[in-house]
């Protein structure tokens, strides 16, 4: 599912449960526990940084509490292993469209990298991809460049990065068909899916 120094994409339709899946994974991983078929190679607790621009920290906390209740986890112990962020202060835009070129927002990139280093973060999660850039998602070149730059963040911080992304509306295809993913084919081809 996740590999250090790589970007993985979690793709599903709106309201399909991507954010809950991320929280459930995080709750397990911060305790050093495997989750279903997803095994921790290092076998030790992980630190997780989660940026969710769709749910505020209060809602994220309620959802995390529900995950902990279902799995019998100590909420406070799990919460201490997760650095939660939302868009209440401002969006965490990592890249802008500047005359059809990718311009990384260096202040935000530096912030994320410093936060990861200072807190010994193992996994970064961004939800959804649409809210961490201002690029046209149908542009193969720009999206490939952007995701390559995000992989650079993973390399420099020695973290695994998971990005939640939406599918097309009403695709009518098989669930795992790459044609269901919204935007350019490089969104499918550049990261791990």
Image (cartoon, rainbow, N blue to C red):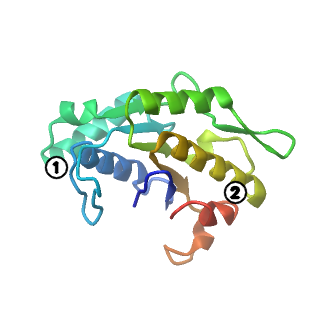
Image-quadrant location for residue 40: bottom left
Q: Is residue 20 left or right of residue 9?
A: left
Q: Is residue 88 left or right of residue 109?
A: left
Q: Which residue is mark 2?
A: 144
CB atoms at circles 1 and 2 under 8 Å apart?
no
Q: Earlier in the sequence, mark 1 or mark 2?
A: 1
Q: Position of residue 153 (x, y in %)?
A: 56, 42
Q: Nearer the viewer, residue 178 or 102?
A: 102
> Looking at the image, which residue sits at the far top?
89
Q: Nearer the viewer, residue 188 or 182?
A: 188
Residue at 27 percent across and 66 percent down: it is 37
> Looking at the image, which residue sits at the far right?
99
Disc 2, SS: helix
Q: Is residue 34 visible?
A: yes
In which quadrant of the rendered image does the N terminus lie?
bottom left
Q: CA distance from mark 1 to mark 2?
A: 38 Å
């Amino acid at each position: 599912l996740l590999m250090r120094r790589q970007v993985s994409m979690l793709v599903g339709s709106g309201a399909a449960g991507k954010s809950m899946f991320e929280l459930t994974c995080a709750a397990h991983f911060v305790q050093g526990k495997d989750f279903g078929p997803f095994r921790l190679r290092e076998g030790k607790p992980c630190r997780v940084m989660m940026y969710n621009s769709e749910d505020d920290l209060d809602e994220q906390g309620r959802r995390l509490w529900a995950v902990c209740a279902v799995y019998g986890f100590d909420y406070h112990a799990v919460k201490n292993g997760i650095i939660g962020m939302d868009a209440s202060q401002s969006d965490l835009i990592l890249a802008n469209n500047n005359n059809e070129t990718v311009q990384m927002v260096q202040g935000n990139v530096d912030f994320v990298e410093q936060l990861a280093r200072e807190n010994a973060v193992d996994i970064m999660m961004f939800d959804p991809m649409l809210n961490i850039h201002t690029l046209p998602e149908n542009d193969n070149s720009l999206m490939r460049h952007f995701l390559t730059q995000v992989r650079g963040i993973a390399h420099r911080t020695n973290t695994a990065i998971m990005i939640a992304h939406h599918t097309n509306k009403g695709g009518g295809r098989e669930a795992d068909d790459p044609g269901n993913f919204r935007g350019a084919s490089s969104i499918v081809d550049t990261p791990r899916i």
